[in-house]
Structures are given as structure tokens and as C-alpha cells.
Image: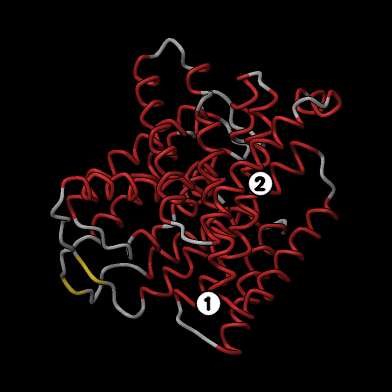
Amino acid sequence: MNKGIIILSLVLTTLAPGILASLHFSPFITVFSLVLGLVIAFLTYSLINVNWDYEGLYNYVKTLKKNVLSILFLISWIISYYLYVIYTSIYVSYYVLNLDGLSATLVTLLVSLVAIGLSLSKYSYYAFPAIAFSQMALVLPIGWKFSVSTVPVQLSSLFLNILSSSLVVVCITLSTFVRFERKFSFYVLLGYGISSIFLLYGSFLVQNSVAVYGTALGNIGLIFAEFFMLNNLLSHGFNVSRRTIYILGLVAVIASLIGNVNYTLFYNSLIYPSVTLLYVSLFVAFLSIFSLYRRSILHIVLGVIALTLFAYGDYSVISSARGIFFLESVTSLILIILLSILLSRERRLARILKG
């Protein structure tokens, strides 16, 4: 299969156009969100043009030459996406497809097995085109109804909605965790441009009953892409054995099954620390922009914008959490920082990170 098609479909899978088309933001919010989202896409493209290899964002964090930041990135990124792999299968069954009972449990199991199994197979790269183009076909606006979402009245609410909406494309950063020639890096921007079309027309239209399967496939594609990239980082970056990766996959499947006992509590208990740590890892990773592109005013300005978005993302998650979920978010943030500081003092670990 053509390498360009594989790379483009990989980028599209991380952006999940099947999900973007269903969000139905107001057109005003969508336009400004796409501009801010382009900042993340462009900086991802810029990082790839430095080095495009299996260690992904970790490659760029290492240029900061601070062990504490390397450890902070690794722990927060790995935990965040591993939790995402677990709870998203629950989300597909109960929140996207609106299933319950035995059917929801079986779909949860099927989603986990297929997504994780595909990510570990020798045909995983060929799965990206199937997932990307299938979800796009399912959310083509055929038979959709015209409906424009309203814009918030208060300027402060409008601004915050724009910031929040622009963060829906952060998973494009997953596309850094593969090894390709840098001459193909433009597919990152092309993939973002194509996905933007889905988010844009979703602002004016309400999807039909078929499109929900495109949304489901978009989420399944993200599970697949996330475990695929986790595998790349661990196996190629740290020589984690194939057996260990399989065990991690099995544990994720079992955990998602356990989540069916109380899916609401399970989903909320995982998503808050997961997203909190995701923004921490991205904040650390994009600090590398200032070392890799220190002489580019454009990259410095865009880097500041990206860090502001990630900082706001964490603020938004923590401030919206209530009760035990608030404690989870704050505790996960504090523990990860403290653990990173303690581990950075270990000389043996420092040698491994430098290697």
C-alpha cells in the first residue's frame, strides 16, 4: 500500500473525523477553534521535521536535558493514554451507542479486543486506512438536518468555549510516535485540513442515525492508535518485551470489562486523572519548541499559545471536577510531580533516560 496513504490515514485516525463531525459547535466557535487547533497541528509538524521516530514526543523532551521533565512526561503520558484505552471502550458502548446490559458488556469486550489486538498485529499499519476512511464515509452529511448551534451571550463564556473546543485535536500529537521520513511530514497538516472540514460542516448540520457508527468508529480508532503508539514508545524506546506489552493489553481488556459493573463511576473515575495528566505531558513536551526553535519568533509565539491552551485544559478539567473526581485530578497531578522529582534523583534511571 502507498506509504502516503498510510501516513495520511494514521494522522486522520488520531484526529477522528467521525467524532469531529458530531460535535456540533457553533460556527463562530468552530472557526476560532480551528485557528487555535492549527497552532497545535503546525507545532506537531515542526517537531516531526526535527526527528520522526518511535519515541515521539519523548525525543523532543530529551532535548531539554532535564531528567525531571523527561520522567514527568513519560509517567503522565503513559498513564494518561493507558487509562484512555481502558475507559473509551466503555464510552463507546454506553455513551455513543447507548447500549445497556449484556449487549453493552459484549460490545465493550469486542471493542477492546479488536482495537488492542489490531494495534499489536503485524498488519496494524494497514488498519489505519480502513478505520480512517470508513468513519469518514459513515459521517458524510447525507440526510443530515440543517441546524446552527447558538453562540454564548457572554464574551467570557464564548472565549472559554473557544479554548476548550480547540483542544479536541490534541491527539494529533500521537502521530509523532512512528518512524517515517521527514519528507512526509506535510501529511500532518493535510490531515488536519481534511479533518477541519468535518468539524466545520458539523456546526451547521445535525447527524443522522447512521453517523453514530462513524462516531463509534472514531473512538475505536483512537483506542487503536493510542495503544499502537504506547507499544512503539515502550518497545522501541525502552526495549519492553512483547510479553509485557501483551500483558498490558490483557489487563486493559479485563479492566474495561470490570467497568461494566458501574460504568458511570468507572468512566468518570478514569477520565479526570487521564485528561489531567494528558495536558501535563503535552505542556512538558511542547516546552521543547523553545529549545529546538529558539531562533524562530513564529515558533516561540505559537509555543506560548500552545502552552496556554494546555494549561487552560488542565484548569478546565480540575475546575469542572466535583467531589471525589476533583480529589482524583488534584492528587494525580501532585503525585506525578513529586514522583518525578524523586525518581530524577536516581542515577541508574538517569542513565537509562539519557540512553
Front position in the image: 332 or 168: 332
Q: Residue at x 77, y 32 (%)?
A: 343
Using the rendered view, name the quadrant where residue 43 is placed: top left
Q: Position of residue 233 (x, y in %)?
A: 69, 41
Q: Position of residue 118 (x, y in %)?
A: 66, 62
Q: Is residue 324 left or right of residue 241?
A: left
Q: Which mark is residue 78?
A: 2
Above or below 128: residue 353: above
- Badge 2 marks a residue whose secondary structure is helix
Dot 2 amino acid type: Ile
Q: Residue at x 57, y 89 (%)?
A: 101
Front position in the image: 209 or 5: 209
Check disc 1 and report the residue beneath it: 93
Q: Residue reaching furthest bottom?
A: 102
Q: Residues within 10 Å of mark 2 (few under 14, many from 20)?
A: many
Above or below 136: residue 286: above
Give me the C-alpha separation between circle 1 and circle 2: 24 Å
Location of the C terminus by quadrant is top right
Q: Is residue 111 left or right of residue 187?
A: right
- Badge 1 marks a residue whose secondary structure is helix
Proximity of marks 1 and 2: CB atoms separated by less than 8 Å = no
Q: Position of residue 340 (x, y in %)?
A: 70, 34
Q: Residue at x 51, y 25 (%)?
A: 287
Above or below 172: residue 215: below
Disc with the residue nearer the chain's start (1 vs 2): 2
Q: Residue at x 22, y 50 (%)?
A: 157
Q: Position of residue 270 (x, y in %)?
A: 59, 61
Front position in the image: 83 or 37: 83
Using the rendered view, name the quadrant where residue 215 is placed: bottom left
Dot 1 amino acid type: Ser
